[in-house]
Structures are given as structure tokens and as C-alpha cells.
Image (spheres, helix red, strand yellow):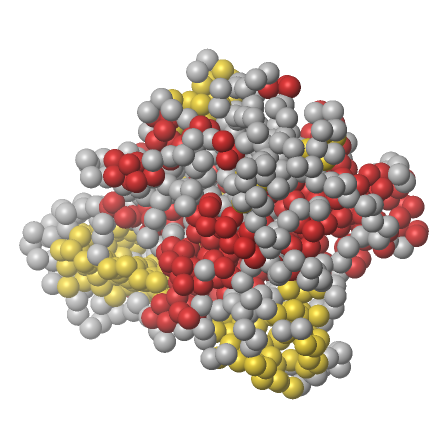
């Protein structure tokens, strides 16, 4: 049981250190600190050896949620702006050296020193602590044991602490300890960004009070966020928690005072140590730190707040106890029981999700950083990863989901300005967002394989707006938060619908609307080969999700209370005729097909086939096929090769019934055979260059090819643990993939949907995960317990005065009264969309506009591409020589 809640490493391997630092990060939703060793110098001061990558093995980053800063760099003669999540002053430094009696002081000891002979570390997931143990031995056989426990407090989000115990073996003397705060840090944790400007901090000032509290303050250079850290370092003789004496000079200890530089401040202690069983046989040094910024509410002066916080903080034993209580309360709210090694990995994933997005996050103006608060990859930006995170949080910590949606709501004006800048109505959310909601996607990106800087067109992934709308809808369905749906949620949903309606162009030859010039989730394809025009036409994922947004917006608009509807008409300057256009566009958006499958985008089927086996033989790992081909002077735009799930993402977002209903609404075919053929087609043409890809394929294959799903499930579980992409996890964990594995257990295998005031279940469990349990919050019921056991499920509802929970399983409705539990037999799993003609439970907007018949003629070439666009974009029926699949 202990191992089920721990994550441990034995030995020290500098090549693995940054991966371990990321996976051993501690945080509380307000800030997080990587699991770097406290005695190691900054990366720039570490000797570089051939087996250790550039910058050294250690990177002690600390990040506050939402603390961004903008810098300008010169790349290829162009000035480029980038906004980064700022690496803040390092509060970890605590180094030491021994001074045996009658000898000169020894060297400062680190993991990289030759005297280090043993090392191990263990992450306690239940209690939220990192424990490290090192043993050093010099040439004379003198040994020093060092044990350190670290926490970033989950109860008080501004506190962190180190408890370090020193024990001598075979010598008597003193140990010198230097502890402090280092403000001389940069954002240098990602090698490919190192050509860019990275000095985000300025205006350093240090201070030391008579009681030994030291402080460092600085600010970000452009966003002007003030940052203050204060620290208190005390010696505790005896080495036990809550030990006897405190103070630098008590029991023979000597506090040497402070050492200050322009950007750092340190305290130095000289403490007696011996191997005898007396009061100096072991000594502990407790370092307590407080972190505040000028963005914090109700503090006044952040320097005063930080100094007062460390002075008020109790000793380490009390801090540890209250920290563990806070974690125990949190684990109670997010309980998930999965046996075996899979359960242990899932617990690690959940641990990191909660450290990035905790109840403290609900009070902040922050989004979902794609790489957590664990590193600097993607510059700490917010993409669409909330699409994989919020569905899990909705059923456990809905207040956090609402706070994350508010991040998007506060940036709705920026999204509307972005749409207007392109001549369109509504809201165009950015692909990469940070502080103020403007588009943060860089215009150039570096291919490390070729060393070339290339145009970055990923800002054309406008489907991020559909993800925002989807998250609003799912949150409100799960929580019954009608107040949010009718206010902020409605504003976002309606403005995103306006954007899609205004982006749709009517094609008379198809009698269909088309959305041109976009990039889909695949990301590899950003233009047609041979043309300089960026973007693609009729990306199926984009068009189908746009149709979903438009239909939901129409439905919501008509369901709004009259007073609220009139208020929105005035506030959004909405023309009452607009919802009628939304209805029309939602039913007649074009979906391309080729060779009996759904096309990823118009013309995908006419691209060249790739020699997959040949590239695997030559390169082995071809996950980043785009970089490989570009380095060869080729482009992935020429090939039927996808980075990650694109069309298949629809099977992740929507249940089989709802997906079939969406296609039927569009007047397009999608039955079990067609969907299976589509899954098989793209499964053979996907390189899985994103950690999200294996997750989505797990979800889809669990209902189509269950025997193949486990391979992708294992890859999803171990993607970060084994750093499957070769170095990326050390730059920050993949938060969406981690949360997605949790949601696969919670919703993917259970088929759980929350709609129409009921829990809908359509189980599709994997044999390797057939026994598990989740505890969810559904509407006013806080702890609904759902457990699966050998073809049966048990639902228990806690006692309350609330109405019974309505459960829909296999077409039958069951009521589970509060204070009771029921066992239900599982129906046979259904794979893929239902057969044609089966009614979809997805609600349809009222006053439907009849859809036009689907033409059988091929799509005409796009005149705007002047002969460069692929020809023969076929309709669902295909060309005359290719009969349609049975529908």
C-alpha cells in the first residue's frame, strides 16, 4: 500500500535528472517548484560533461500561476515578441560542507561531487512531500548523511519549507550551512528558446532583519509584477521533528550572519556535529519561505506580507501536519480507486493535476497551462488542453472549472477584437493565450533537427473556440449551474457561434457552407502542397464542432428567459435574425469524404502516401515526422500523415449516439462500418507526435477495437513517466494527457455523460482495467460512488434530503435514492455510432431548417488557389466509379 502512494528513484543519473525534477515538482495551484536538489548550483554554474545536455543536469524553476512577462528578441533579422511564464527567484538554495576538527573545511557538497556515494528520493503522493537522502564520504572515510523533506503548502498557498537533517559518521567537528534566496535566474529551461531574450526580472533588492529573516524583492521587466520571497532558517538540535533547541548560537551553534549580493541573500550557520549519542549527534536545519506578488488580493505591501508570513509560520512539524491535512481533504474530493501499477501511475497524474489546478486556483485569474507549473515548454501558455482537463474537474472540483472558464470570459473582449481584426463577427480565441488574451503563438518556430526557423501557422487552429464552448456546456451540464450558463456562459457561447457563422462561406456548387483557411488538431498540415496560401479547407473536426457550437447556441438562445435574452441582445448587439443563420449553417456545413472514409480535410485523400516502414527503418522514432521531413528538404504537407488524432477527436468529444446525431443533422452518413473504416484509415497514418494522440486513440479504440486499446492506454499512462518523446517531460509535464488518462477511467470506460438531469452510462471497460471505482460530485450530491466489478456496477448515493439520482443504463432508467446503493448488470458494449435510423438522444434546436440534399458531384477546385488546390474533393457518395458504403 505504501508503494501505491509513492514515486521513488534510487541512485543519481545526471541524464535523468531533469525528468525527475519535473515529475517531483511540488505545488499547490498558486505556485510550484521543480524537484531540483537544494544544494546544487544553478544550471549556468554546473560543469557540462559530454553525457549531460547543454545547461547542466539541474534546473530549479519556481513558477507562480499567471505570472507572465513579455520580451522582444531578434530572430533572423526580425523583432519577435514572446510572453513567458516567468522563472522566479530560487528559494531552494541550502548548501553544506563539513569541517572536521583539526582540518580545513571540505568542499561544498552536491550530487555531482565525487564524494557522493548514495542517493535516493521519494515523492509521497498522499502527503504531498518530497524526501531526499544522500550520503557523502571523503578520502579519509568520513561520512555525512543528509535527509531532507520538502513541501509546498497545500493549506497556505504562499508557504514552502525544507527540513534537512545532518548526521556524522566517523568524525567530529562542525557543519557549515548556507541557505538563502537567489534572484539571479533566467528562463533557460528549454534549449530551443536559448537564442531568445530570457531575463525577465529586474529591480532586485535584498534585506535582512535582526531576527534572521531575509528577503528578496524584484519585479518583472514589462508586466511590472512585484515578486517578494522571505525566508527564515533555524537550527533544531537532535534531528527530530519538533526537536529541542532553536537558534543559531544555542547549544554551541554559531550563526555567522548574512551574505548579500545585488540579486541574492544568504544566511550562514556553523553547527557542531559528532557521531556520539549526545545533543549534537544530529542537527536539523529548517528553512521556511513565503512567496507573494503584487497580484495577490488583500495583502497591501507584498514585502510586509511575505516577512510577516514567515514570522508567523509554525515550526516544520506543525507545517507538515497542516499540509498533510489539506492534502487529505483534497484526496477525499477526488477519490479514484484503480488497482495495480496503472492505479499508481494514475495517482501520480492526479497528483500533478491537483498541484497545478487546486482549489486555490479557483480564486486566481489563470487558465490551464499545457505543461503545468512544472517547466517552461510552450512558455507556460494556455492552449486547448482544458478540453482534456475540465471534464474531469467538473465532477470533482467544479469551482475550479468555473474559475478556469472565467479566465476565458475575462478575455472575451480580446477574442472579439481579434475577430474584428480579421473582418469577422463574434469571438476568435487565440491558439496560445497568456496574460491578456491576445494571440501568443509565435510566428516562427525552430526545427532542432535542421536548425532552421520556420513559419508557424498554428494560430489558424480556430477550433480552440469550439473547445471553449464545449467546456462551458459540459460544466453547466455536470453542475446544473444555470446561472452561469445564462450569463457568462451564454456570452461566450453566442460570440463563438457568431464567429463560426461569419466564417462560413456558401458554395453554390455544393449547396453547402465551407470554412476555409484553417489548421486542424493534426497540426502537421498547415497548407496545401505547392501553394503559399496558409491553411486548409473544410477540416472535418473544425466543421463538425462548429456545427455543434451553432446548434447549441441556437438552442440556448431560444431557451433563455426573456429578460436575459433581451439583455444579451443589447449587450452583444445581437441581431434577432442571427440565430436563424446559425441554425442554417449548423445544418449545411460541408464534410468531405474520400474512398469510403471521412476526410480529415478537403483534398486529404489526394495527398501522397508515405513510406512509413521505410522511415521507421531509417529513423526509428518518427513521432516528429514533420521535423524529419523538413530536415530532408521535404514537407509533411505532401503526405497522408497526421501528427495526432484529428477526425478521430470527434470520437473523444462525443458519444457514439451524439456523433451520429451530429452527422445526421448535417445530412451526412456515419454508421458503424463507416466509422470503423475511418478509425482504421487514420490509425495507419498517424505518427502520434503528441502525448494527446495515444489518449484519444485509447478512448476511441475502447469502443471500436477493444483488443487494441490497451497498447495506447499503456502509452498514455507512461508517456511522461518514461519521457516517451525523448526529453520533453523535463521541460514540463503534459497536463492534458495526464488529466485525460483520469477522465478515460472516469468517463471513457464508463461512458458517463451528465445531461438531462441524469447520469448516463454506456460502459466500455478494458479487460486490464475492469475493476475500478470513482467518486464524483453530481449536481447537489457530493460523493456519488460508482464502482465496476466483473460485468456489474454499483452506484451509492450519500444520505441527504436531495432528490434521487437518475441513472440511465442500457436504455433503462434507474433511481438511486440518497442513503442507498444499487447493483446493476452491465449491458453488452456497443461499438461505434449506432446503426442508421436510430434516434439520437442529443437535443436538437427547435425550428429546424431542412437541409439541402448532398450533391454527388466532386468538389470544384478552389479558385482562390489558382490551380494549386487538390482536385476531386468528393462528396460522401464518392465518384461514380466508387459506390458508397452501406448507410
Location of residue 260 in the rendering, given as x and y in whole percent from the top left corner? 39, 38
User: Does any portion of residue 496 appear in the rendered image?
Assistant: no
Which quadrant is the N terminus positioned in? bottom left
Residue 276, image x, y percentages: 17, 70
The residue positioned 50% from the left and 35% from the top of the image is 605
Looking at the image, residue 381 lies above or below residue 124: above
Q: Can residue 238 be seen in this view?
A: yes
Q: Residue furthest bottom?
A: 820
When the figure is inspected, residue 506 is found, relative to residue 587, above or below; the finding is above
Left or right side of 153 for 579: right
Q: Quick one: which residue is furthest to the top in this view?
A: 77
Q: In this view, does 69 lie to the left or right of 266?
A: right
- Along the viewing direction, whichever of 324 and 861 lies nearer the viewer: 861
Residue under the image location 83 percent in, 49 percent down = 848
Query: Residue pushed farthest front?
Result: 881
* Image quadrant assignment for residue 721: bottom left
The residue lying toward the viewer, choosing from 146 and 884, is: 884
| Residue at (28, 36) in percent of width and height | 614
Q: Where is residue 506 in the image (x, y as percent from the top left)?
A: 74, 30
Q: In which quarter of the image is residue 661?
A: bottom right
Tell me: residue 299, above or below residue 588: below
Horizontal relation, residue 677 to residue 578: left or right: left
User: In the displayed structure, does residue 218 sit left or right of residue 577?
Assistant: left
Residue 312 pos. (x, y %): 53, 59
- Which residue sits at x=29%, y=45%? 40
Q: Nearer the viewer, residue 211 or 493?
A: 493
Count of residue discs: 0
Amino acid at each position: 500500500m505504501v508503494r501505491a502512494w509513492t514515486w521513488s528513484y534510487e541512485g543519481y543519473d545526471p541524464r535523468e535528472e531533469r525528468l525527475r525534477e519535473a515529475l517531483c515538482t511540488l505545488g499547490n495551484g498558486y505556485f510550484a517548484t521543480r524537484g531540483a536538489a537544494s544544494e546544487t548550483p544553478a544550471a549556468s554554474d554546473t560543469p557540462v560533461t559530454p553525457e549531460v545536455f547543454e545547461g547542466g543536469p539541474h534546473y530549479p524553476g519556481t513558477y507562480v500561476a499567471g505570472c507572465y512577462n513579455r520580451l522582444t528578441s531578434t530572430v533572423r533579422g526580425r523583432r519577435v515578441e514572446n510572453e513567458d511564464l516567468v522563472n522566479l527567484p530560487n528559494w531552494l538554495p541550502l548548501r553544506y560542507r563539513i569541517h572536521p576538527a583539526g582540518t580545513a573545511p571540505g568542499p561544498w557538497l552536491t550530487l555531482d561531487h565525487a564524494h557522493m556515494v548514495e542517493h535516493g528520493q521519494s515523492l509521497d503522493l498522499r502527503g504531498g512531500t518530497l524526501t531526499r537522502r544522500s550520503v557523502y564520504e571523503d578520502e579519509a572515510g568520513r561520512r555525512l548523511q543528509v535527509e531532507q523533506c520538502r513541501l509546498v503548502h497545500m493549506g497556505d498557498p504562499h508557504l514552502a519549507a525544507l527540513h534537512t537533517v545532518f548526521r556524522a559518521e566517523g568524525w567530529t567537528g562542525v557543519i557549515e550551512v548556507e541557505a538563502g534566496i537567489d534572484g539571479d535566474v533566467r528562463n533557460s529551461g528549454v534549449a530551443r528558446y536559448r537564442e531568445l531574450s530570457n531575463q525577465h526580472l529586474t529591480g532586485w533588492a535584498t534585506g535582512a532583519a535582526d531576527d534572521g529573516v531575509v528577503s528578496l524583492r524584484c519585479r518583472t521587466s514589462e508586466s511590472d509584477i512585484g515578486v517578494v520571497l522571505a525566508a527564515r532558517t533555524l537550527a533544531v538540535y537532535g534531528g527530530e521533528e519538533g526537536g529541542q533547541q532553536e537558534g543559531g548560537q544555542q547549544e554551541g551553534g554559531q550563526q555567522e550572519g548574512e551574505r548579500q549580493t545585488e540579486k541574492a541573500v544568504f544566511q550562514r550557520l556553523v553547527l557542531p556535529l559528532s557521531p556520539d549519542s549526545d545533543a549534537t549527534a544530529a542537527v536539523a536545519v529548517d528553512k521556511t519561505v513565503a512567496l507573494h506578488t503584487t497580484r495577490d488580493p488583500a495583502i497591501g505591501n507584498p514585502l510586509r506580507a511575505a516577512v510577516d508570513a514567515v514570522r508567523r509560520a509554525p515550526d516544520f512539524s506543525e507545517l507538515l501536519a497542516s499540509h498533510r491535512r489539506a492534502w487529505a481533504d483534497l484526496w477525499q474530493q477526488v477519490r479514484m480507486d484503480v488497482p495495480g501499477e496503472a492505479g499508481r501511475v494514475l495517482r501520480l497524474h492526479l497528483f500533478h493535476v491537483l498541484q497545478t489546478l487546486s482549489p486555490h486556483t479557483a480564486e486566481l485569474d489563470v487558465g490551464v497551462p499545457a505543461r503545468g507549473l512544472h517547466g517552461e515548454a510552450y512558455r507556460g501558455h494556455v492552449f486547448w488542453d482544458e478540453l482534456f482537463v475540465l471534464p474531469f474537474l467538473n465532477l470533482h472540483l467544479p469551482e475550479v472549472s468555473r474559475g478556469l472558464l472565467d479566465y476565458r470570459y475575462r478575455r472575451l473582449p480580446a477574442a472579439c477584437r481579434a475577430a474584428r481584426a480579421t473582418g469577422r463577427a463574434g469571438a476568435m480565441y487565440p491558439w496560445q493565450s497568456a496574460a491578456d488574451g491576445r494571440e501568443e503563438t509565435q510566428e516562427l518556430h525552430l526545427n532542432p533537427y535542421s536548425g532552421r526557423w520556420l513559419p508557424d501557422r498554428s494560430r489558424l487552429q480556430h477550433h480552440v473556440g469550439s473547445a471553449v464552448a464545449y467546456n462551458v456546456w459540459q460544466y453547466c451540464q455536470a453542475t446544473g449551474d444555470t446561472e452561469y450558463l445564462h450569463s457568462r456562459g451564454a456570452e461566450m457561447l453566442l460570440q463563438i457561434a457568431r464567429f463560426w457563422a461569419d466564417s462560413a462561406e456558401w458554395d453554390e456548387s455544393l449547396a453547402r457552407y465551407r470554412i476555409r483557411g484553417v489548421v486542424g488538431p493534426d497540426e502537421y498540415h498547415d497548407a496545401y502542397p505547392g501553394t503559399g496560401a496558409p491553411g486548409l479547407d473544410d477540416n472535418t473536426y473544425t466543421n463538425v464542432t462548429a456545427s455543434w457550437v451553432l446548434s447549441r447556441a441556437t438552442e440556448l438562445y431560444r431557451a433563455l428567459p426573456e429578460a436575459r435574452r433581451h439583455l444579451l441582445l443589447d449587450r452583444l448587439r445581437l441581431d434577432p435574425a442571427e440565430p436563424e443563420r446559425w441554425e442554417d449553417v449548423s445544418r449545411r456545413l460541408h464534410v468531405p469524404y474520400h474512398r469510403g472514409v471521412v476526410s480529415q480535410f478537403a483534398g486529404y485523400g489526394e495527398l501522397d502516401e508515405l513510406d512509413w516502414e521505410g522511415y521507421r527503418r531509417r529513423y526509428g522514432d518518427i513521432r516528429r515526422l514533420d521535423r524529419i521531413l523538413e530536415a530532408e528538404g521535404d514537407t509533411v504537407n505532401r503526405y497522408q500523415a497526421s501528427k495526432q488524432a484529428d477526425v478521430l477527436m470527434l470520437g473523444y468529444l462525443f458519444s457514439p449516439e451524439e456523433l451520429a446525431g451530429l452527422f445526421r443533422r448535417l445530412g451526412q452518413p456515419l454508421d458503424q462500418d463507416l466509422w470503423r473504416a475511418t478509425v482504421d484509415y487514420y490509425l495507419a497514418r498517424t505518427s502520434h507526435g503528441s502525448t494527446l494522440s495515444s489518449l484519444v486513440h485509447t478512448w476511441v479504440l475502447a469502443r471500436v477495437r477493444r483488443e487494441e486499446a490497451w497498447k495506447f492506454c499503456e502509452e498514455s499512462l507512461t508517456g511522461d513517466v518514461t519521457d516517451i518523446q525523448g526529453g520533453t517531460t523535463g521541460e514540463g509535464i503534459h497536463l492534458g494527457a495526464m488529466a485525460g488518462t483520469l477522465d478515460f477511467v472516469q468517463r471513457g470506460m464508463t461512458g458517463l455523460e451528465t445531461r438531462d438531469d441524469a447520469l448516463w452510462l454506456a460502459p466500455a471497460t478494458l479487460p486490464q482495467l475492469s475493476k475500478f471505482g470513482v467518486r464524483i460530485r453530481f449536481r447537489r450530491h457530493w460523493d456519488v460512488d460508482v464502482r465496476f466489478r466483473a460485468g456489474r456496477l454499483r452506484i451509492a448515493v450519500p444520505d441527504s434530503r436531495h432528490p434521487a439520482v437518475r441513472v440511465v443504463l442500457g436504455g433503462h432508467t434507474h433511481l438511486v435514492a440518497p442513503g442507498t446503493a444499487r447493483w446493476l448488470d452491465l449491458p453488452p458494449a456497443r461499438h461505434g455510432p449506432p446503426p442508421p435510423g436510430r434516434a439520437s438522444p442529443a437535443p436538437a434546436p427547435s425550428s429546424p431548417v431542412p437541409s439541402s440534399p448532398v450533391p454527388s458531384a466532386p468538389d470544384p477546385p478552389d479558385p482562390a488557389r489558382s490551380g494549386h488546390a487538390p482536385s476531386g474533393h468528393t462528396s460522401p457518395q464518392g465518384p461514380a466509379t466508387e459506390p458508397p458504403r452501406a448507410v
